[in-house]
Image (tube, rainbow, N blue to C red):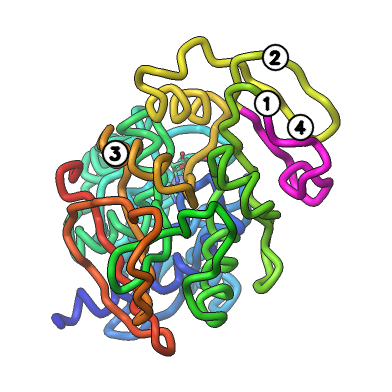
Amino acid sequence: MKEEEKYMQRCLDLAEIGRAEARPNPSVGCLILYDGKVIGEGYTSPYGGNHAEVNAVQAVLSTYGSQEAKRLLAASEVYVSLEPCAHHGKTPPCADLLVEYKPGKVIIGCLDPSEKVSGKGVERLQRAGIPCEIGVLGEKAKWSVRRFMTQVTKSRPYVILKWAETADGYFGSSDLQQKWISNPATKQWVHKWRSEEDAILVGKNTALIDNPSLTVREWSGKNPLRVLVDKHLEVPLEYKIFDSAAETLVFNAERFDLKKNVRFIELENFDLYLPQNILYQLYLLDVQSLIVEGGAKMLQSFINAGMWDEARIFSTPEKWGEGIKAPEIRGEVIEESQIADNTLTVMKNSAFDS
Ligand code: AOF
Ligand code: ZN
């Protein structure tokens, strides 16, 4: 790894620390280097708070005092994983802050695709005479803000499909009874994943057969918004998916109202473009990411529509010989790991690379 890639990797690691709290803001990492020494670091504060650049500059100011900090910053290199913003949002533009201290160079992971920024941050820096280098660890930087990127560029949430299947490709038993497939260790992973996304979706049959809570219990973090697709409202309101632990959204063909923590959204068409319609409704509600947990038919409909970005599949050594077939998917395998005797395969949808 080249020297500048190491510093950008550090920015990406810093961004990771702030990710859960910064949501739906993209979490960014920033590092300030003077004469080969890191003199300040920062990452995006909880939503509505400081951006990474502000926190990194403040770190330098508080360590060195304002006069010395000014001198150091003017001769430093600033590494930042996302293009510094150029707009007045909840906070003032980071590009202006950098222009004020005029570092020798700004090194950027990737550009910010949102209309209010896209290229304007870099332009402002360059107009002030600050050289910029863009694209250091570019693919990794894009990956770190993939949920935000998808929301902005595709006008839909980032979609993660998740399921477990047997070695011979079965997903559930044919007698429609719940039958656990993956090992208990995988459960903690699943709960961690739930804590990382805005929403989680299941179809009516999964809700009826498994009676899932869809909450985060074996990890700490926020419960996602629960989304149920139930055309004729067949899932009884006493089921766990409606309990007070989280909010629930029900896409259906019967009613459009709110009852305590349950919001019913009537969809006109359940036969055509269902995944697209659901994702558009969620986009309007500012949902940035969604996990689809089942069942097989629901997962397959997202796959067939091309409406997925990532798939996380557990496979077990067990063979059932019969049952409901697991979804069929093709994508680029980006990770394969072992969790006890289960294999976790992570795929991305290369057809949708931007
Ligand atoms: C940065 N550094 O750390 C982040 C950026 O409403 P605001 O002011 O918080 O602005 C949110 C937007 O700023 C967000 O949509 C994205 O374009 C950018 N995020 N930019 O320079 C950061 N988190
Ligand atoms: Zn900013």
Mark 4 vs mark 2: in front: 2
Q: Which residue is mark 1?
A: 233
Q: CA distance from mark 4 to mark 2?
A: 12 Å
Between residues 203 and 352, which one lies in front from this camera angle? 203
Residue 191 is situated, as x and y percent measured from the top left of the image, at 59, 66
> At 23% across and 51% down in the image, what residue appears?
329
Q: Which residue is mark 3?
A: 124
Picture quarter containing residue 343? bottom left
**Mark 2 closeness class: few <14, some 14–19, many ≥20 residues within 10 Å:** some
Q: Which residue is mark 4?
A: 262
Task: Tell me, for residue 255, which label it has, or none.
Answer: 2
Q: CA distance from mark 1 to mark 2?
A: 9 Å
Of all residues shown, which one is farthest toward the bottom?
Answer: 340
Q: Would residue 180 be found to the left or right of residue 142 on screen?
A: right
Q: CA distance from mark 1 to mark 4?
A: 12 Å
Q: In the rendered picture of this protein, how many numbered marks are placed on residues?
A: 4
- Residue type at mark 3: give it: Arg
Please say if 8 is above or below 224. below
Q: Give, as a single range, the part of the protein colored magenta.
A: 234-250
Q: Earlier in the sequence, mark 2 or mark 3?
A: 3
